[in-house]
Amino acid sequence: MTQAPPLRLFNSLTRQLEEFQPVHAGEARVYSCGPTVYNYPHIGNMRAYVFADILGRTLSFKGYTLTHVINITDVGHLTDDADAGEDKMEKMAAQKAKEGQAQSIWDIAQHYTQAYWADIRALGIRQPAQWTIATQYVPQMIEFAKTIADKHCYELDSGLYFDVSTVADYGRLARAQTEEGEGRIEAVDGKRNAADFAIWRKTPPGEKRQMEWDSPWGRGAPGWHLECSVMSGEVLGFPFDIHTGGIDHREIHHPNEIAQNQAFCCTNGLDVPANSGARIWMHNNFLVERSGKMSKSAGEFLRLQLLIDKGYHPLAYRMMCLQAHYRSELEFSWEGLGAALVRLKRLVMAVEQLKTRAEPAAAAGERFQPFLERFDAAVSDDLNTAVALTVLDEVVALKKVDPGEKLAAIAAMDAVLGLGLLGIERTDLRIRPKSTAIAEGEIEAILGQRKAARADKDFARSDALRDELAGKGVEVMDGDPLGWEWKLA
């Protein structure tokens, strides 16, 4: 067996591939920016967590003890991602009240957190070592701010602001020290620099927020950027290994996190990546539609439940993500999702057949080592899941090999890909669209009658039963190489 290749990852801070060298030997400490729980996540949001899951699974596959943290932002994130507007959570609470659905902001946060966690489970994403909830860390945020306030911050009527000129190499992660980059940040009277950002936001005179706390700078709430610095440092310690997020975080949110980390840790310039608080910063690219970047306000709201309502298993979307490199834009289409589902079905059927013939607890033998080595090389090359999937397909297609060893090789690969191939069956992938009235039991009963008619060579009745199903939105798939029998149109 050849020596395992080193894990190489693309560092957004240095803009190059780097060999992973853990801060603590044998460990991997990872922080991922989580959702702001003011609405349901769309599938573009969820791509970030599929990517982070693949990263975590790959680190485990490579032998590291993984500590993965994902945060839940339930306060502090404004309606634009820079430094202006309303708190997203407060705005949603006000909107609900206006619609006659008065709910506390805490109830709203809990509802959408549970919805997000349901999507996490549906996509086969492993639970992190810890979920950090922003409102549970407010005392630590105040202490963090107090530590950096004298040297790096100044106070205005609206709150405590961070002076970005007090740290070296501000904005290097974004490479966007331009008018375009600064144009995303609304001007605030008294700010020293356009890019300065709020550490603490005071509640305006005469107003009362549902989420507010006392601080040395007045009653108010923390800024969004402060939260992630505090929670990552508290749980993982500075510097930790890897910080992940969507590419949209690379321009403002993560540079501001880095500035805070530099101030808190008293580190210098970013020629030393660890001075940023994390050795490696990783970002997944956007999921896009033909109309452009996906958003909650553009067209049909593509959340995971919509895919399920249309008859697609959530793991088909995971497969779709795996077929593209995480740093590439991924175009969403219903045709592409359908193709991903067919590919997943083929794999599930192959594994089902193997399980009927395989002896339990078999290990992958020498015949499979070259494939496992190529799979390792693919995921070690900046998580190249597209290539890794082709290696899996090759293993599934192998003939005249021990079925138990083959199953063990598939299991080893699926531990990284997370498609659940050994735990699901093809019937699990058959989801009835919400708009279809016919029940699955009725479909199977009519199909049973049709099989009996065909066995009796009563083709007129067979055709009539097929037409009856077609009229109810069920397509009978005679001759389907997958043997799927039927699908809902």
Image (cartoon, helix red, strand yellow):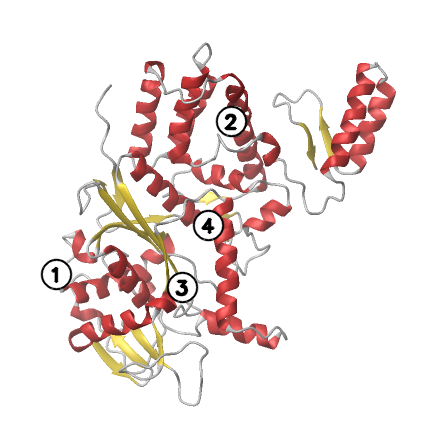
What number is the disc on residue 268? 1
For residue 295, say whether it is visible: no
Q: From the viewer's perspective, is residue 133 above or below residue 447? A: below
How far is disc 1 from disc 4 in space, using C-alphas? 34 Å
Dot placed on the residue nearer the N-terminal end, 1 or 4: 4
Residue lying at the far top of the rendered structure: 400
How far is disc 1 from disc 2 in space, using C-alphas? 50 Å
Mark 4: which amino acid? Answer: Met
Q: From the viewer's perspective, is residue 256 above or below residue 328? A: below
Q: Provide the residue designation for mark 4.
A: 46
**190 or 145: nearer the eye?**
145
* SS label for mark 1: loop
Dot placed on the residue nearer the N-terminal end, 3 or 4: 4
Dot placed on the residue nearer the N-terminal end, 1 or 2: 1
Position of residue 54 in the picture relative to residue 443 (left or right): left
Q: Within the image, what quadrant is residue 218 found in?
A: bottom left
Dot placed on the residue nearer the N-terminal end, 3 or 2: 3
Q: Percent x, y for residue 127?
A: 40, 48
> Residue, x 70% and y 36% (percent of image)?
488
